[in-house]
């Protein structure tokens, strides 16, 4: 039982614009933590494997149309579906590296023009991250990277609005990472911060709730 001494894993979220490198980095961070003796797992939102996740995926691929409020609530519900699983993993000592979370939910819907407080409400009470790594990159630079343009939100003007909305959500748990550098240099910036966070959680920091 990994939890026999009462220590828990850390909840670490990676956020940023499309193509900022979250997916590449989250995989590397899980591997690094494991090497250093911290059990770790990768989560990502949307989780397209659930029934709700399949609805979201079809919307993102433009195979279905949904009202902006409706899809916002689906994204939030998709996180609530995973809340208790995430909590039990954290309590058993596993650090979770999460590729997008409630901040994406609010930033993308606010960029469409929805009220920010309305957007935050359905995610209130989810587990609050111990650390948010914001992979900072200009929308222009991100758009030059591979695979850009395929899905609904991958347009430059829209990504600029998302970047503005993210700024409103920054709080003390955020660390800003320069994501315009090489994959190795981006990881290097995060490693020390991540290990400090994992240690603090292992030493008994308690879990809290988001936006309450
Ligand atoms: N969304 C929402 O509206 N509401 C919500 O609540 C949530 C999400 C959770 C799908 O998300 C969409 O859902 C997303 C937000 C919205 N829309 N947008 N835009 P997703 O996470 O499934 O998909 P994504 O944002 O498109 O993520 P991605 O494709 O996984 O991109 P990424 O993770 O940031 O980047 P990557 O895959 O690691 O890298 C992208 C490319 O850049 C790839 O070719 C890499 O080789 C390259 N790359 C990565 N790092 C570097 C560096 N450092 N230098 C050079 N090139 C690099």
Image (tube, helix red, strand yellow):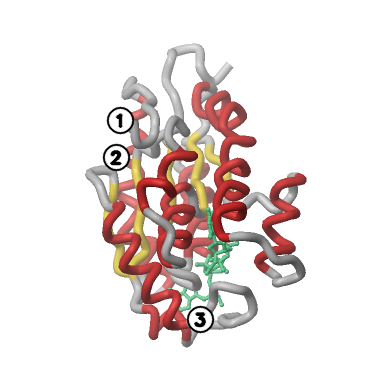
Q: Which residue is mark 3?
A: 155
**Residue 121 makes an appearance in the image:** yes
Give the residue at mark 2: 196
Q: Are marks 2 and 1 in contact (CB under 8 Å)?
A: yes
Q: Tell me the quarter of the picture where residue 82 sits.
A: top right
Instruction: Classify 125 as above or below 140.
Output: above
The CA span between labels 1 and 3 is 39 Å
Instruction: Tell me which numbered mark, 3 or 2, is placed earlier along the sequence.
Output: 3
Counting from the top left corner in percent of width and height, residue 184 is at 41, 68
Q: What whole-number distance in Å separates the C-alpha atoms at marks 2 and 1?
A: 6 Å
Q: Position of residue 81 (x, y in %)?
A: 64, 36
Return the x and y of residue 109 as percentages of the image width and height: 47, 59
Residue under pointer 1: 200
Q: Is residue 160 above or below residue 91?
A: below
Please tell me which residue lies in front, 169 or 131. Answer: 169
At numbered mark 2, what does the secondary structure look like: helix, strand or loop?
Answer: helix
Residue depth check, mark 3 versus mark 2: number of the one nearer the observer: 3
Q: For the residues marked 3 and 2, what is the alpha-carbon distance in whole angstroms?
A: 36 Å
Q: Quadrant of residue 209?
A: top left
User: Could you tell me if the residues under marks 1 and 3 are in contact, i.e. CB atoms within 8 Å?
Assistant: no
């Amino acid at each position: 039982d990994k939890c026999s001494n009462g220590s828990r894993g850390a909840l670490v979220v990676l956020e940023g614009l499309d193509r900022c490198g979250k997916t590449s980095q989250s995989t590397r961070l899980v591997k690094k933590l494991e090497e250093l003796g911290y059990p770790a797992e990768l989560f990502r939102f949307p989780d397209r494997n659930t029934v709700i996740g399949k609805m979201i995926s079809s919307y993102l691929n433009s195979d279905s149309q949904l009202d902006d409020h409706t899809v916002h609530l689906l994204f939030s519900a998709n996180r609530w579906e995973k809340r208790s699983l995430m909590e039990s993993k954290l309590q058993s000592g596993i650090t979770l590296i999460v590729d997008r979370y409630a901040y994406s939910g609010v930033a993308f819907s606010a960029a469409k023009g929805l009220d920010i407080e309305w957007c935050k409400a359905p995610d209130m009470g989810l587990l609050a991250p111990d650390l948010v790594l914001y992979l900072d990159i200009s929308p222009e630079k991100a758009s030059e990277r591979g695979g850009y343009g395929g899905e609904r939100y991958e347009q430059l003007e829209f990504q600029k609005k998302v970047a503005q909305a993210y700024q409103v959500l920054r709080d003390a748990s955020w660390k800003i990472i320069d994501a315009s550098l090489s994959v190795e240099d981006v990881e290097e910036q995060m490693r020390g911060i991540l290990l400090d966070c994992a240690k603090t959680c292992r030493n008994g920091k308690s879990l809290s709730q988001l936006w309450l």
